[in-house]
C-alpha cells in the first residue's frame, strides 16, 4: 500500500484499511484489536462474495442532531478478489454498515473484514477504481469520484475504494507537501481547515510523500488542529484525550513529521462537542471483538482503535456528546478518516 505506513502511528493502530491487501494487520501481536460485542444478542451474518458467516449483534442506534449513536459491529470473512469484495461491501452497505478494514485475530487464527452501523440511517454504495501512482492522476480520479458523491476511502489491494452515503454531498480534494515538524503540520492543517478541508492521510505519489485533504462541499464545517506529545501509557492517553475532548477536540492518531512524532487532535469549529475516552482489554478472537464493541456501542461508545505503548496494547473507545456528523462516529482506526 502506498498509504504511508511509516507515517501514521503504525506501532499504535492494529486495524487497517487493507481490504484484501497483504498489509492485513495482526491484532496487537496476537491479540485482536478492536472490540466488539454482540451485547444485543449474537447472530450470524453471511458475507457474499467470499464472506462466510461472521458474528454480529447489538442494538440499533438512533440519529438526529446531537443524538446518541449506538454503533453495531460485524466481523465477516474476507473476500478473495475485487469483485467479491465489492459484493461484500455493497451488501453490507445496503444494510447501513460501512467498511472499516480487515483485522487478524491471533486467538482463533482468523482474518475478518470489520463493518460498523452507526445508527444514523445511511445506506452506503462502494466503487473500486484503478490505483494511481501519480499526483495528477490521483487528484483527477478522486475529484471526479467526489463530484459524483463518492468519497475516497483508501487504497486496497484491489484498487482505490470510494464510498457514497446516498446524500447529495460532493467532495473535493487537494494535495499538500509533507512537512518536517508538528508545528509545521498544525500551520498547514489549520490553513486547510479554515477552508473546510479535513486531513485524510499522508500518501506516496510520484515517489513523494504528500498529505491528502478532503472537503465536503455540502458542509460548512471548518477545522482546527492541535499536535501534542505522544502519551507514554494507556492511562496517559486516556487522560490526554479526555482533556482534549473536553475542549471539543477528537483524537486523530499519532503521526510522524520529520524526526518528531505527535498525537493529532481535530475540532469542528462549527460545533461544541465533547469526547470522553476509555480503554478496554484487547480481544484475541473475532467473536470477542464483536461482543466487546457492541456492548460498548450499545452504551453510546464508538471504537477508536488499538494503541501500543511498549509491549502493552489496549483498545480504546470514545463517547461523543453534543456532536453531529462524521467526527462523532467510528472511523477507519488506522487513519481516522
Image: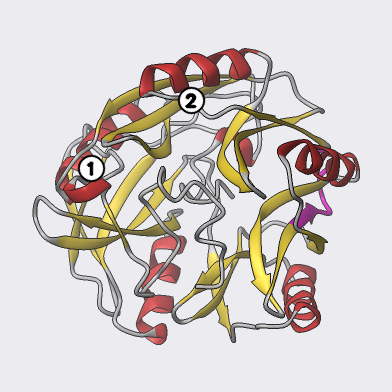
> For residue 165, what is the image quadrant?
bottom right
Identify the mark nearer the N-term, 2 or 1. Answer: 2
Q: Which residues are magenta?
A: 213-221
Q: Residue 10's x, y, as percent?
A: 44, 51
Query: In the picture provided, is 141 more to the left or to the right than 240?
Result: right
Question: Badge 1: few (under 14), some or many (20 or more) residues near its Cα, within 10 Å?
Answer: many
Residue 44, numbered label: none
Q: Which residue is mark 2?
A: 231
Q: Against 141, is 105 above or below? A: above
> For residue 22, what is the image quadrant?
bottom left
**Viewer-proximal residue, 180 or 102?**
180
Q: Which residue is mark 1?
A: 289
Residue farthest front in this picture: 259
Q: Residue at x 17, y 37 (%)?
A: 41
Nearer mark to the viewer, of 2 and 1: 2
Q: Against 270, is 332 above or below? A: below
Amino acid at each position: 500500500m502506498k498509504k504511508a505506513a511509516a507515517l501514521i502511528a503504525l506501532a499504535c493502530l492494529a486495524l487497517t484499511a487493507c481490504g484484501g491487501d497483504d498489509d492485513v494487520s495482526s491484532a496487537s501481536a496476537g491479540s485482536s484489536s478492536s472490540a466488539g460485542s454482540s451485547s444485543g444478542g449474537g447472530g450470524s451474518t453471511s458475507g457474499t462474495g467470499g464472506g462466510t458467516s461472521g458474528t454480529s449483534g447489538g442494538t440499533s442506534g438512533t440519529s438526529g442532531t446531537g443524538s446518541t449513536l449506538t454503533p453495531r459491529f460485524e466481523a465477516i470473512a474476507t473476500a478473495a478478489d475485487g469483485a467479491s469484495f465489492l459484493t461484500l461491501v455493497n451488501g453490507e452497505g445496503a444494510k447501513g454498515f460501512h467498511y472499516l478494514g480487515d483485522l487478524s485475530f491471533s486467538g482463533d487464527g482468523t482474518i475478518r473484514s470489520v463493518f460498523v452501523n452507526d445508527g444514523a440511517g445511511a445506506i452506503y454504495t462502494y466503487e473500486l477504481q484503478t490505483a494511481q501512482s501519480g499526483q495528477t492522476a490521483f487528484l483527477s480520479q478522486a475529484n471526479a469520484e467526489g463530484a459524483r458523491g463518492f468519497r475516497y476511502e483508501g487504497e486496497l489491494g484491489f484498487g482505490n475504494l470510494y464510498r457514497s452515503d446516498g446524500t447529495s454531498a460532493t467532495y473535493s480534494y487537494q494535495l499538500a507537501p509533507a512537512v518536517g515538524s508538528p508545528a509545521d503540520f498544525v500551520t498547514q492543517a489549520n490553513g486547510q481547515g479554515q477552508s473546510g478541508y479535513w486531513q485524510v492521510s499522508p500518501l506516496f505519489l510520484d515517489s513523494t510523500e504528500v498529505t491528502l485533504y478532503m472537503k465536503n462541499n455540502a458542509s460548512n464545517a471548518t477545522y482546527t488542529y492541535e499536535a501534542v506529545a505522544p502519551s507514554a501509557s494507556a492511562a496517559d492517553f486516556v487522560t490526554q484525550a479526555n482533556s482534549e475532548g473536553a475542549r471539543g477536540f477528537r483524537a486523530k492518531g499519532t503521526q510522524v513529521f520529520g524526526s518528531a512524532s505527535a498525537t493529532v487532535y481535530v475540532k469542528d469549529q462549527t460545533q461544541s462537542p465533547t469526547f470522553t475516552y476509555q480503554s478496554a482489554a484487547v480481544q484475541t478472537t473475532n467473536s470477542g471483538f464483536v461482543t466487546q464493541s457492541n456492548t460498548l456501542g450499545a452504551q453510546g461508545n464508538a471504537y477508536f482503535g488499538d494503541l501500543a505503548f511498549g509491549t502493552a496494547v489496549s483498545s480504546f473507545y470514545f463517547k461523543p456528546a453534543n456532536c453531529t456528523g462524521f467526527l462523532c462516529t467510528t472511523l477507519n482506526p488506522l487513519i481516522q478518516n
